[in-house]
Image (cartoon, helix red, strand yellow):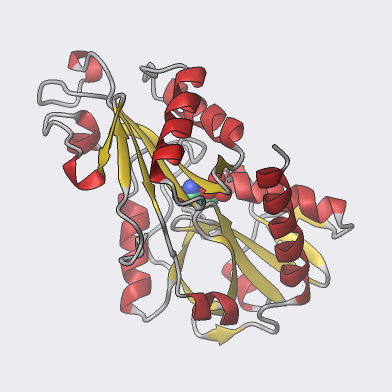
């Protein structure tokens, strides 16, 4: 993710203290750093309010439970930390990265030496893609690097282990594309490196299911529910590369990404970009964001 260089200084809440992010320190023996042993959430805030915070904290708590990591703070304490940090950041709109690591331990994979996880939350302004590209649609590639198998690391766990997503993203950059779509071991479409993928075919919205290897994205859930509300047929479906190449429309969703239309997949231009379904969903998504950030 590219943090906007002109943005105000990013702030970090680290184990109860707020400081400039550049001053925040984690011990080198933290297993989050040594092994990617930890969990995280990316959360947007609009008008000084964290968007869908409960859903994010719920997913964080499930991710932590799934890897046997006791959260050092309860839900209320995490909510208070988020509120304090947003208040200190002053700028009303931005992005939070909430990370819980396994904590400091001895060298070696066994987490039993880690007595308490470290919790930090970074507040920053983030421009994931250039606004012009966002308007015109981005180019994506299907990466040779596959998503980890469901029985290797369950995609519902939002862990700190993103190495194969990073490798996929490097493939995209090398090909002059802005994002990579990862396939599962069977060659079916999972998701982008940090976002979920949707296509439109004959007016129906289609997205891979979580069991095909997609993260149960919070933005994905919202888009599915908004589509139903708008009377747009929507199905979870196993998708092959062919389905992406021949789709009427394709777009990505995520907390950082929000909604981004896709213009080209592996150099094949899509029929519409941005398409009619994308435009409709984008409009109602922005309305939802505005409503939820102002109905105090
Ligand atoms: N897939 C992956 C691998 C991600 O990292 C993200 C971003 N957290 C998403 C999908 C989108 O999920 P969400 O809408 O909850 O941000």
Q: Quadrant of the C terminus?
A: top right
The picture places residue 86, in percent across and down from the top left corner, at 45, 40
**273 is higher (above) or lower (below) than 115:** below
The picture places residue 215, in percent across and down from the top left corner, at 54, 45
Q: Residue at x 47, y 36 (%)?
A: 154
Q: Quadrant of the N terminus?
A: bottom left
The picture places residue 12, in percent across and down from the top left corner, at 30, 39
Is residue 215 visible in the rendered image? The answer is no
As drawn, is 202 to the left or to the right of 255? right
Q: Residue at x 84, y 51 (%)?
A: 228
Q: Residue furthest right?
A: 231
Q: Residue at x 43, y 47 (%)?
A: 90
As drawn, is 216 to the left or to the right of 285? left
Q: Of 49 and 78, which appears nearest the observer?
A: 49
Q: Of 35 and 25, which appears nearest the observer?
A: 25
Q: Quadrant of residue 294?
A: top right
Total marks placed: 0
Is residue 27 visible in the rendered image? The answer is yes
The picture places residue 61, in percent across and down from the top left corner, at 49, 24
**244 is higher (above) or lower (below) than 267:** above
Q: Of 280 and 242, which appears nearest the observer?
A: 280
As drawn, is 138 to the left or to the right of 37? right
Q: Quadrant of residue 7?
A: bottom left
Q: Of 113 and 26, which appears nearest the observer?
A: 26
Q: Residue at x 54, y 35 (%)?
A: 56
**257 is higher (above) or lower (below) than 53:** below
As drawn, is 98 to the left or to the right of 242? left
């Amino acid at each position: 993710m590219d943090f906007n260089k002109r943005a105000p200084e990013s702030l970090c809440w680290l184990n109860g203290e707020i400081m400039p992010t550049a001053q925040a320190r984690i011990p080198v023996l933290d297993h989050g750093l040594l092994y990617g042993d930890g969990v995280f959430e990316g959360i947007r805030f609009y008008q000084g309010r964290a968007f869908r915070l409960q859903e994010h904290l719920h997913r964080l708590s499930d991710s932590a439970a799934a890897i046997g990591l006791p959260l050092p703070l309860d839900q209320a304490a995490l909510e208070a930390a988020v509120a304090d940090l947003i208040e200190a950041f002053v700028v009303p709109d931005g992005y939070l990265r909430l990370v819980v690591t396994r904590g400091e331990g001895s060298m070696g994979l066994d987490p039993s030496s880690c007595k308490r996880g470290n919790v930090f939350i970074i507040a920053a302004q983030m421009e994931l893609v250039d606004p012009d590209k966002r308007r015109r649609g981005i180019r994506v590639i299907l990466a040779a690097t596959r998503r980890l198998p469901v029985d290797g690391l369950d995609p519902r766990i939002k862990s700190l282990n993103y190495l194969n997503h990073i490798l996929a993203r490097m493939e995209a950059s090398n090909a002059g594309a802005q994002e990579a779509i990862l396939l599962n071991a069977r060659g079916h479409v999972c998701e982008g490196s940090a976002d979920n993928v949707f296509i439109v075919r004959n007016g129906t919205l289609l997205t891979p299911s979580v069991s095909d290897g997609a993260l149960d994205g919070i933005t994905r859930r919202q888009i599915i529910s908004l589509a139903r509300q708008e009377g747009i047929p929507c199905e979870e479906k196993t998708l092959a590369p062919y389905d992406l190449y021949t789709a009427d429309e394709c777009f990505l969703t995520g907390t950082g990404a929000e909604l981004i239309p896709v213009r080209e997949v592996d150099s094949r231009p899509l029929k519409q970009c941005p398409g009619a379904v994308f435009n409709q969903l984008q409009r109602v998504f922005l309305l939802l964001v505005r409503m939820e950030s102002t109905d105090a």
